[in-house]
Image (tube, rainbow, N blue to C red):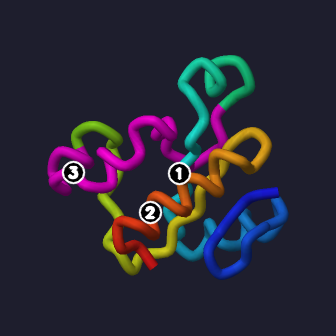
Amino acid sequence: RLCAAAAPNLSYQELKDLKKANVLHIDVRERWEIDRFGKIPESINIPLGELVEALQMDPTEFKEQYNQNMPSKSDPVVFSCLAGTRSKQALGFAMSLGFS
């Protein structure tokens, strides 16, 4: 299950449907986990330990680092990880920074 503010848990199919609507999908697993278990298509990897800094970057710097436009505080964002614990932490971090 995945975590999102509007619906705390999303199924795989719900995520696939959301991704058709330009939702930014941030995978907060460590890079070694991506290498070992694979990348989720059309997601960007920002390990949880880098997330707070990343969400406060200058948009140009974010684009250079992650090859993706930085989300605005009102853009839809979905966080995922391996079991759900880190994605819930990521959601809390983003909300504490003013993301809705």
- Numbered range of the magenta stretch: 39-63
Q: Amino acid at mark 1?
A: Ile
Q: Which numbered tag is attached to residue 94?
A: 2
**10 inside magenta stretch:** no
Q: Amino acid at mark 2?
A: Ala
Q: Quadrant of the C terminus?
A: bottom left
- At mark 1, the secondary structure is strand
Please indicate whether residue 61 sits to the left or right of residue 55 in the image: left
Marks 2/3 in contact by CB < 8 Å: the verdict is no
Q: Residue at x 65, y 57 (%)?
A: 88
User: What residue did someone put label 3 on?
Assistant: 57
Marks 1/3 in contact by CB < 8 Å: the verdict is no
Q: Which numbered tag is attached to residue 42?
A: none
Q: Quadrant of residue 11?
A: bottom right
Expressed as whole percent of the image width and height from the top left, the position of residue 43 reads 55, 48
Point out the tag, 1 or 3, that comes first from the N-terminus. 1
Q: Residue at x 71, y 48 (%)?
A: 85
Q: CA distance from mark 1 to mark 3?
A: 15 Å
Please indicate whether residue 74 sits to the left or right of residue 5 in the image: left
Point out the tag, 2 or 3, that comes first from the N-terminus. 3
Expressed as whole percent of the image width and height from the top left, the position of residue 24 reads 50, 62
Expressed as whole percent of the image width and height from the top left, the position of residue 74 reads 39, 80
Point out the tag, 2 or 1, that comes first from the N-terminus. 1
- At mark 3, the secondary structure is loop
Q: CA distance from mark 2 to mark 1?
A: 11 Å
Q: Amino acid at mark 3?
A: Met
Assess disc 3: are there few (<14), some (14-19) or many (≥20) residues with their C-alpha within 10 Å of its C-alpha: some
User: What residue did someone put label 1 on?
Assistant: 26
Assess disc 2: are there few (<14), some (14-19) or many (≥20) residues with their C-alpha within 10 Å of its C-alpha: some
> Depth-wise, is mark 1 or mark 3 nearer the camera?
3
Q: Residue at x 25, y 48 (%)?
A: 63
Above or below, 29 against 18 in this view is above
